[in-house]
């Protein structure tokens, strides 16, 4: 078995040629447009993109987690520890992933049941997913509260969600996601609703869980700034396609795709002495209800070649001279594209 | 020295709760002055009172005690003359969709303040609207659109244009960037910087994001639990913060370089900000402070000038 096949068989999450169409009452949106991605055990992969780039749909739609009233059409394959999720009924998919996947949402107050105390919510989750009895479930719940850094877990067990602060609730949410002993944790903007000083704590906690328990983490964020301290690999998503993928160091310090460069230039670097370095990206994120013939970023791209970039779709190809797995989809900046 | 554009003196805003003796002390003795033509940031975490301060500055929130004077006139005096106030002070909110009428086109939204203030003839108003659209970088084809068919940043641009319609000299902005994507934020940051420079506006910007604030502002006030922790020139504050809370806030901003990020010594504060209903005794920050000394829990630190050039309320730093 060669290295790649071996990697594929071990991957916790394996997405292949995924296309997802979303239908609302009035429009059809191609949210994901041909994405392949693998997440290895114990790895933290950050998915970065603007609103509407498809980053949430990519990971949550295959699990059957979509807002009410949206009809979805999925083509391709999503395997979680070898179990195919695409084409399964939602209940069957949930059964397959039972304890395998834990999800942390942006807004814990709407993810937790406001009518139930924190502890029993954790306890019943542990009972359902680990098949333990109530007493064991209670112990697991208290251990998880302690594990996620909640002070005085026995007391907090009896609290309602509204009695806890935002940071504490997010910790409880992480505890809930861990209740099923997942091999994969999907964190969808886990720090966006939090204050700066609390954000650092939660990122540190997620990183610590990944490192010590060997859980793979998919971190979904719109803020490329938060990934530098925690992620191993970064996927930059634009208009439902991967613009660039690679190790966090390469993507952040030597970005290849103009969109990645633009994103990085949008984040002010406070530790540099020069001010006024943010330039941002002109225009707005693409409207996915109108599909683009060429590179979807070309209307906002300063480097776009007229009559080329807006006509021909760039393919995601390995970047020559870079470490294995570094890929970019750009006609202009990826030298591999010229030979293709 | 000339008179400051905004002078806040020992402002207190308490919100009553069910328990009579325990009001929420949203602002508990805040003093600050904003110089004419400066770009002043008010920074802090949720619950520090920054939005209450913004609301008090525009007269939407009556003060429990203390005073606010804007261009030499007390806010209560201004409130009896709201039309004059509106042409002097304007505001931009976090959520532009909530600030604009969903049934008004962009043109109607921009024309309304001009009509209320009986400014110019129809053609003059048209010219003014065209000028406003140009100022905020929107194409004139959007004039007849409704807010729902605009993107988030375009809506925010319309809200800014509307705030500028009456040529105010002071702009109060409450988190105008936080509803926007990162790549779009930078565009609006640059827009604010240009407007401030070209129109000579005095801008007070409420924000939770220190990094963004440094890009455009000249002065900053850092707030913690209803009190001012540090105030001063933003470049000095970034070079050598005079308050450990400012330092922790700065430290919480990650570096974009993963190699640097691994080496960097980070200050991670313990716990959440305490409740403003029951603020800690002495220095309000002492429960989370990494350099706190025993006296910090009993003595309330006064705001005093630090060697580094800013003014901070800390007993420990020099």
Image (spheres, coloured by chain):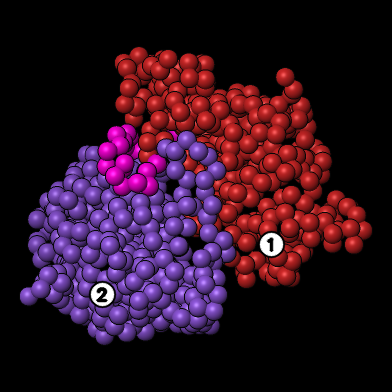
Chain colours: A purple, B red
Residue B67: x %, y % from top left: 67, 26
Chain to which the residue tagged by mark 1 belongs = B
Q: Label 1: which residue?
A: B138
- What predominant SS class does the magenta segment belong to? loop
Relative to A225, does residue A332 appear above or below in the rendering? below
Q: Label 2: which residue?
A: A15
Q: Is residue A16 left or right of residue A310?
A: left
Q: Quadrant of the C terminus of chain B?
A: top left
Q: Quadrant of the N terminus of chain B?
A: top right
Q: Quadrant of residue A221?
A: bottom left
Q: In the rendered structure, which segment of residues is drawn in magenta? A: B253-277
- Mark 2 closeness class: few <14, some 14–19, many ≥20 residues within 10 Å: many
Residue B258 shown in magenta: yes
Q: Secondary structure at mark 2?
A: strand
Mark yes or no: residue A334 visible: yes
Q: Residue at x 79, y 54 (%)?
A: B113
Residue A51 shown in magenta: no
């Amino acid at each position: 078995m060669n290295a790649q096949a071996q990697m594929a068989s071990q991957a916790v999450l394996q997405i292949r040629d995924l296309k997802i169409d979303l239908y609302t009452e009035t429009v059809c949106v191609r949210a994901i447009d041909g994405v392949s991605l693998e997440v290895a055990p114990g790895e933290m992969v950050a998915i970065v993109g603007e609103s509407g780039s498809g980053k949430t749909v990519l990971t949550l739609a295959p699990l059957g987690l979509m807002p009410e009233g949206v009809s979805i059409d999925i083509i391709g394959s999503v395997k979680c520890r070898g179990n195919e999720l695409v084409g399964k009924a939602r209940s069957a998919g949930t059964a397959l992933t039972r304890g395998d996947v834990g999800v942390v949402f942006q807004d814990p107050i709407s993810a937790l049941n406001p009518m139930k105390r924190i502890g029993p919510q954790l306890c019943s989750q542990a009972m359902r997913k680990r098949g333990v009895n109530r007493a064991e479930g209670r112990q697991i719940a208290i251990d998880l509260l302690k594990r996620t850094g909640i002070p005085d877990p026995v007391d907090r067990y009896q609290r309602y969600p509204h009695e806890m602060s935002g940071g504490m609730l997010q910790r409880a949410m992480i505890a809930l996601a861990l209740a099923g002993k997942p091999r994969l944790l999907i964190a969808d903007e886990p720090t966006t609703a939090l204050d700066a000083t609390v954000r650092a704590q939660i990122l540190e906690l997620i990183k610590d869980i990944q490192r010590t328990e060997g859980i793979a983490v998919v971190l979904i964020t719109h803020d490329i700034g938060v990934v530098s301290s925690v992620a191993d690999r970064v996927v930059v998503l634009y208009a439902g396609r991967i613009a660039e993928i690679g190790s966090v160091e390469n993507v952040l310090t030597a970005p290849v795709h103009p969109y990645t460069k633009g994103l990085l230039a949008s984040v002010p670097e406070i530790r540099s002495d020069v001010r006024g370095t943010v330039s941002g990206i002109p225009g707005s994120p693409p409207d996915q209800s109108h599909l683009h013939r060429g590179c979807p970023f070309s209307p906002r791209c300063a480097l776009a070649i007229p009559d080329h970039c807006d006509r021909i779709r760039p393919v995601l190809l390995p970047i020559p001279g870079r470490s294995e797995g570094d890929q970019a989809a750009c006609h202009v900046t990826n030298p591999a594209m010229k030979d293709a | 020295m000339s008179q400051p554009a905004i002078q806040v003196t020992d402002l207190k805003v308490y919100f009553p709760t069910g328990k009579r003796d325990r009001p929420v002390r949203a602002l508990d003795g805040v003093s600050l002055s904003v110089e004419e033509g400066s770009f002043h940031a008010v920074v802090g975490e949720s619950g520090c009172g920054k939005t209450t301060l913004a609301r008090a500055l525009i007269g939407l929130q009556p003060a429990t005690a203390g005073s606010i004077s804007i261009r030499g006139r007390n806010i209560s005096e201004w409130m009896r003359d709201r039309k004059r106030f509106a042409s002097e002070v304007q505001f931009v909110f976090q959520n532009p969709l909530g600030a604009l009428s969903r049934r008004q086109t962009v043109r109607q939204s921009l024309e309304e303040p001009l009509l209320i203030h009986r400014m110019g003839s129809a053609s003059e108003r048209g010219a003014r609207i065209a000028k406003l659209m140009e100022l905020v970088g929107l194409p004139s084809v959007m004039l007849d659109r409704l807010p729902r068919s605009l993107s988030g940043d375009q809506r925010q641009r319309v809200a800014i244009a509307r705030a500028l319609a009456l040529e105010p000299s002071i702009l109060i902005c409450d988190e105008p960037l936080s509803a926007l994507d990162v790549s779009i934020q930078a565009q609006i940051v640059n827009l604010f910087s240009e407007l401030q420079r070209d129109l000579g506006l005095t801008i007070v910007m409420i924000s939770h994001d220190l990094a963004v604030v440094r890009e455009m502002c000249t002065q900053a006030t850092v707030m913690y639990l209803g009190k001012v922790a540090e105030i001063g020139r933003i470049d000095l504050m970034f070079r050598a913060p005079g308050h450990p809370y400012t330092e922790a806030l700065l430290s919480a901003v990650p570096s974009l370089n993963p190699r640097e990020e691994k080496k960097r010594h980070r200050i991670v504060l313990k716990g959440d900000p305490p409740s403003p209903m029951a603020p800690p005794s002495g220095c309000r920050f002492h429960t989370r402070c990494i350099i706190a000394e025993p006296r910090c829990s009993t003595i309330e630190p006064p705001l005093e000038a630090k060697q580094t050039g800013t003014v901070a309320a800390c007993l420990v730093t020099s």
